[in-house]
Amino acid sequence: MSRYNGYGVSKLALFAAAAPSLIKRSNFPYGLDKEVVIKIIEGTYTDRPKMLSGFGDIFFFQYTTQPFSYWFLQLGLEAAGWATAAIANTWINEELFSDLGKINVPTLIIHGIHDKVVPFQLGQIQKQAIRNSKLIPFQYSGHGSFYDQKKNFNEELMKFIEE
């Protein structure tokens, strides 16, 4: 949105977005400790199935069956290992503090309050930084609110699209 000045975008929806920074910094006490992400990267190279299984364990707040967990693990294994590590590296390096204030379109923010991947406080910060934004906290969701509260998620997204 910032890089292209919102060109061609009339609305924006953010779902558990890792902005303005997923990593705690000296001037930003929210998010994850850098060491947590470094362990994800190391786990990607040393025992990727174990890392992905652990990631799946914290992704959802609601109960998931063993077959669902296995399916979710398989989704992660389909990605290239180098790509998984590269994405995690972006979490360490990206800082979008000035970008949020440049968003000038109606913005829906859906964030699970039990999110262990991207802490809920980041959704609150996005709400404060983005003009014309609406934060909808999902009370019974983790990072995967699209699954944890799928009916509510779909309703809120459709309502936002149709507004």
Image (cartoon, rainbow, N blue to C red):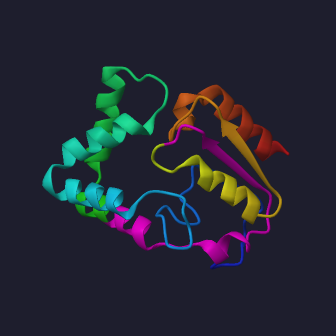
Q: Which quadrant: the N terminus?
A: bottom right
Asked if residue 35 lies left or right of residue 18, the reply is left
Is residue 159 something that shows in the picture? yes
Say if 33 sits above or below 120 in the image: below
Residue 114 image position (x, y, % from top left): 54, 37
Say if 82 sits above or below 57 in the image: below
Q: Residue at x 29, y 40 (%)?
A: 54
Which quadrant of the figure has residue 101? bottom right
Residue 130 image position (x, y, % from top left): 75, 64
Say if 153 sits above or below 37 in the image: above
Q: Residue at x 36, y 62 (%)?
A: 88
- Range covered by the magenta-colored residues: 86-115
Which quadrant of the figure has residue 105? bottom right
- Asked whether 34 or 107 is in front, the reply is 34
Asked if residue 100 lies left or right of residue 105, the reply is left
User: Within the magenta stretch, is there residue 110?
Assistant: yes
User: Within the magenta stretch, is there residue 82?
Assistant: no
Residue 27 image position (x, y, % from top left): 56, 73
- Asked whether 92 or 154 is in front, the reply is 92
Q: Residue at x 85, y 45 (%)?
A: 163
- Asked whether 22 or 79 is in front, the reply is 22
Is residue 1 something that shows in the picture? no
Residue 82 image position (x, y, % from top left): 24, 63
Q: Residue at x 17, y 58 (%)?
A: 45
Asked if residue 128 lies left or right of residue 62, the reply is right
Q: How many marks?
A: 0
Asked if residue 143 lies left or right of residue 40, the reply is right
